[in-house]
Image (tube, rainbow, N blue to C red):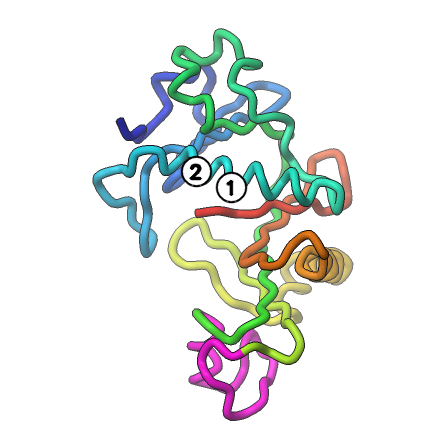
Amino acid sequence: MALSTAADLVKAPLLYKGKVRELYDLGEHFLIVVTDRISAFDYVLDPAVPEKGNVLNKLSSFWFELTGSMMDNHVVHTDVNQLGDLITDPELLKDRIMVTRKAERIDIECVVRGYITGGGWRQYETSGEVNGIKLPDGLRKNAKLEVPIFTPAAKNDVGHDEDIPMDRMKELVGDALAVELQEKAYACTNSPVITVINVASFWQTANSSSASWMARSS
């Protein structure tokens, strides 16, 4: 059975309902529940896909654990049994939940590209650049770049995220934080324990000035 919402299973206020995830307020922490809803091109499609949320949550948990020694993240635990009576049917949510520290989102998606593909390729075809970075002429689609490039995007809650150059990112979040995010994104991709990271988003904890990493699976 596919789970389209957890609203009837969680005894806590629902703060935000995204295309796939739902955010509940536990007081000290947040509870993220990953549903089986599926989205494409900013639309939620029917029907939901059974077990999709379980897979997404396990993927996220895997990357957070793997990179936890590299930088701090927002995860407290993923054990539904620790939530006690807050969950009316623990079996349905046992692989779907993540309890996190409360954090203020930095509205930048940090992307390190090692290959010219996807949205980067579309930019290159038009201008020969990706996020304002001039690349050599004559590259072929999916070609490996000589040096990975940092290509951030401004997060939009409605519509598509906006690809931006580093200068624009500095205007949005400040020079120091922009450089810190860039350095941490490169650190993730250069780690010997990680071969490929496609997209990384960064969050700033409410009680810390340092940025922590969040792998986003969707």
- Residue 204 x/y as whole percent: 68, 43
- Residue 55, which numbered label? 2
Image check: 50 left or right of 149?
Answer: left
Frontmost residue, 77 versus 160: 77
Work out whether residue 174 can be spotted.
no
Who's the residue at 38% across and 20% down the image?
Answer: 92
> Start and end of the magenta stretch?
119-143
Who's the residue at 51% across and 76% down the image?
Answer: 116
Image check: 21 left or right of 110?
Answer: left
Who's the residue at 42% across and 17% down the image?
Answer: 10
Q: Are marks 2 and 1 in contact (CB under 8 Å)?
A: yes
Work out whether residue 114 can be spotted.
yes
Frontmost residue, 191 versus 186: 191
Residue 178 lies in what quarter of the image?
A: bottom right
Image check: 175 left or right of 21?
Answer: right
Q: Is residue 198 above or below residue 46?
A: below
- Residue 112, which numbered label? none
- Residue 108 x/y as whole percent: 58, 55
- The residue pinned by badge 1 equals 59
Q: Is residue 214 above or below residue 23?
A: below
The N terminus - image quarter: top left
In the rendered image, residue 130 lying in the magenta stretch gets the answer yes
The residue carrying pointer 1 sits among few (fewer than 14), some (14 to 19) or many (20 or more) residues within 10 Å by Cα, namely: some
